[in-house]
Image (cartoon, helix red, strand yellow):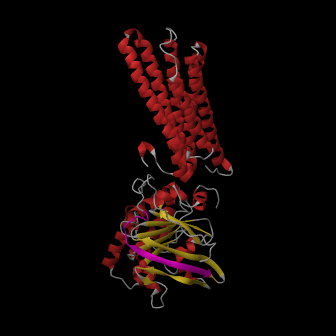
Amino acid sequence: MDESTPVAQTSAAPPGAASAVANGDKGLRSTAPTIIDIDHVDFQYGAHKALHGIDFEIKKKLVTAFIGPSGCGKSTLLRCLNRMNDLIDGARISAGAIRISDIDIYDPSVDVIELRKRVGMVFQKSNPFPKSIYENVVYGLRLQGINHKARLDEAVERSLRGAALWEEVRDRLHTSALGLSGGQQQRLCIARAIAVEPEIILMDEPCSALDPIATVKVEELIHQLKQDYTIVIVTHNMQQAGRCSDVTAFFYIGRLIEIDGTGKIFTNPSQKQTEDYISGRFG
Amino acid sequence: MSMPTNGPASEQISNIRETLLMMASLADRNLALAMRALVERDEKIAAAVEAEDSQLDQLEINVDELVINHMATHAPVATDCRFMLVASKISSNLERIGDSAVTIVRRSLELNREPLLKPLIDIPRMAKIAESMLRDGITALIDNKPELAQEIIRRDKEVDAINKQLARELTSFMLEDPGTITRAMNLTLVARALERIADHCKNIAEEVYYLYHAVDIRHDRK
């Protein structure tokens, strides 16, 4: 790392500072075990280096938010976590490693399909398949060769309940998913992601196309889901990061500038760049 | 504090700062006038203080309206968020300084009905310290000098000590001669008003420290 490279800062609370507990901020001081270890990762799109020496850990069953201006690398990093970037020509991790539960996910022996089963993803724009609600939810299970009706029925109810959608669609499971509202479609995509029982759910701006009511529902869902899953969310909505996450990481031009408990980041960030960004002074 | 470079957020934060400055200026002036009313036994000045206090009351309401409006429309974070909390508290303390100035002039009006009980030495000394605390507190806020807070807190203890000493002295007057009770009680109340003004200045200093350092030093927390 050259001298000009900003180093991500985490800060110990000074004496008398608003305590982590008072902030409702379990964040980085959580004793939760590490599930994702991002170890000095450089990432390139062809010759262009998009991530520089990203190095931090994501804790199990917490919500971690990635924030930063467009082009800062937050979505790139998110997509590294289930190797979605493999689908882009010339995109590669050029240094470092990403380990999930101590397994290097870029090791040639790793089965990418199996990885994406463990690390589900929800995208910015809801993308239900042009099939029934039921078939959308069981899609991943059918790919795994599971066709037993009782098991699929159980998975549909469990997943739709988990995505807080069951009560709204239980009597029309076999109608087209495209007939659902935008907010319902996004929750259906979350149901589809959790049907295969992942450990981690990645969310790339999951509410950016939703109205405020649908946004509240998805945010409430995120809060419920963290009982069972580790969630990593990319968002441009500062208030959403503040409301939903336990830990917030701020990125700028491909570098991690600061990561800390969300309460700390939004009340007293250590880095001026972070404060300027979350206060709307740049970006 | 750093300011947003432009836009409605910047304008709203500037409005709050300017209103606080206006309040501080009025509170400072009212304290000085109240002391003149006491020392010079001037009833016209006393009436002016009462009239100006209602302006402070209105400005306190204005600050809270500006703060809640900014919070609702801009959801401030970090320093801006702390500023909202601190601005509301500082305006409340400034308004109470105004109330204490009114207490001083009301006691002065009663004191004017009788000859001076004793030369006024300690009370003007308390007032002078309190005035310096107020000015330094506002300087700390406007010029980003939270380090002034520690010195302001030290001076509050000085005011407390003078107040206790004066209370003992005035009690002995009352014990020796019940004919002095009304005047001694009024002087005790003036001293207590000044002691409270110093407390409000200390509160302001603590809020400024919190604003710039995000460290809460109230209630002797180090």
Which residue is at a point 49% across and 21% down the rendered structure image? B103
How far from the left and from the top, in percent, is residue A157? Answer: 35, 69
Q: Decide: is B160 above or below A182.
A: above
Is A97 positioned to the left or the right of A142 in the image?
A: right
Please, is residue B55 above or below residue B3 in the view?
Answer: above
Residue A119 in view in this figure: yes
The magenta stretch is: A27-44
Q: Is residue A66 above or below residue B122?
A: below
Picture coordinates of residue A254 (x, y %)? 60, 72
| Position of the N terminus of chain A by quadrant | bottom right
Quarter of the image for residue B35 reads: top right
- Residue A181 visible here: no
Q: Position of residue A208 (x, y in %)?
A: 55, 63
Quick one: A174 or A222, which is closer to the camera? A222
Is residue A34 highlighted in magenta? yes
In this view, which residue lies farthest toward the left? A150
Q: Is residue B72 magenta-colored?
A: no
Position of the C terminus of chain A by quadrant: bottom right
**Residue B47 image point, x, y percent:** 58, 16
On screen, residue B175 above or below A33? above
Which residue shows up at 41% across the image and 42% down it? B219
